[in-house]
Image: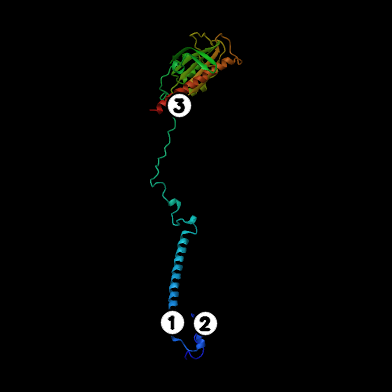
Amino acid sequence: MSYGQGEPPWDPWKPGSQQQQQWDNRTPDWAALAEASESRNKRRKLLLIGGAAVATVAVGAAVAVAVVSANGDSQADNKPTNLPATADLPSGSGTADPSFEPTSAPPPLDPKDFISSAGKDTAPISPDILFPGTQLTVGERVYAKGPKTSTTDCASAALKTLPAVLTKNDCTRVMRVTYSKDGVAVTIGVALFDTEAQASAVKKEADKKSIIASLSGSGVPAFCRTAVCRSTTNSYGRYAYFTLAGFTNGKDVTEKDEDVFTTGDDLARFTFNQIHRRGEAQASAAANQ
């Protein structure tokens, strides 16, 4: 079939006016056809090159999108995702923190332990050591210190039923001191034993007739020899201590005589405190050795 018969072939790359002219002439223009064919080849090459470029750009965009997706959708999410858990991360500068073995201070020494047996209660003792100074001040009350004495013949420092109680429990020493104020006098008697158990036994076995002998002299007249007086008995550690308080004019003490009771209570409390301080001093010295 020749191009001279029927419709000429439609060239999609040529304007319609040129194709209409070919249709009208009915004679093929071989030169024009050759030129059109060459033009079409050039355009295909351009399209292929352009398509390759577009494909390259598309691949580049896909890579960029993949990178963005791997790094997160925003700057706030741009964080590493493969870090170890917090517990696995090293802390500080890489050096271990110093560690210390748990320590605990030894318990403080009990002062009572040092005054509960003759084996530990070894500090010097005398009436002047246990009752120092020339007077005792308790609040607004001032008591003058009078005579003092110490003996290993415990029974000679006691009256009525007390000598037998002291002897039974192996008393080793009795110290006495007298204080006075405004016509009221009180004698403090402190008996020593080898053990706390012996002193406690004296406290239990003593009765209302177990009294320390009053000590007069140094300006204090004899008192509580025939009159009714107020007496107390107590113990602390290896010490048993007693008070005998009354009027220096020989008057009997009654329950209404508050001054006598106050004087006896003040001296009994002071005696307990002095014995306890003795234990504290020895405990402190032992702790510092």
Q: CA distance from mark 1 to mark 2?
A: 17 Å
Residue indicated by mark 3 = 111
The residue lying at 56 percent from left, 17 percent from top is 262
Describe the element under mark 2 as helix, strand or loop.
helix
Amino acid type assigned to the residue bearing label 1 in the image = Glu
Displayed quadrant of residue 48 = bottom left
Identify the mark at residue 82; answer none if there is no mark. none
Viewed as shown, does residue 232 lie left or right of 278? Answer: right
Quarter placement of the C terminus: top left
Amino acid type assigned to the residue bearing label 2 in the image = Ser
Tell me which label, 1 or 2, sits earlier in the chain. Answer: 2
42 lies above or below 284 = below
Q: How many marks?
A: 3
Amino acid type assigned to the residue bearing label 3 in the image = Pro
Residue sitting nearer the eye, 12 or 140: 12
| Circle 1 residues within 10 Å: few <14, some 14–19, many ≥20 | few
Displayed quadrant of residue 30 = bottom left
Q: Nearer the viewer, mark 2 or mark 3?
A: 2
Q: CA distance from mark 2 to mark 3?
A: 130 Å
Q: Is residue 161 visible?
A: no
- Give the x, y percent position of residue 155: 47, 15
- Give the x, y percent position of residue 224: 54, 11
Identify the mark at residue 35; answer none if there is no mark. 1
- Give the x, y percent position of residue 61: 46, 65
Residue indicated by mark 2 = 17
| Circle 2 residues within 10 Å: few <14, some 14–19, many ≥20 | few
Residue sitting nearer the eye, 154 or 126: 126
48 lies above or below 143 = below
Q: Are marks 2 and 3 in contact (CB under 8 Å)?
A: no
Q: Nearer the viewer, mark 1 or mark 3?
A: 1
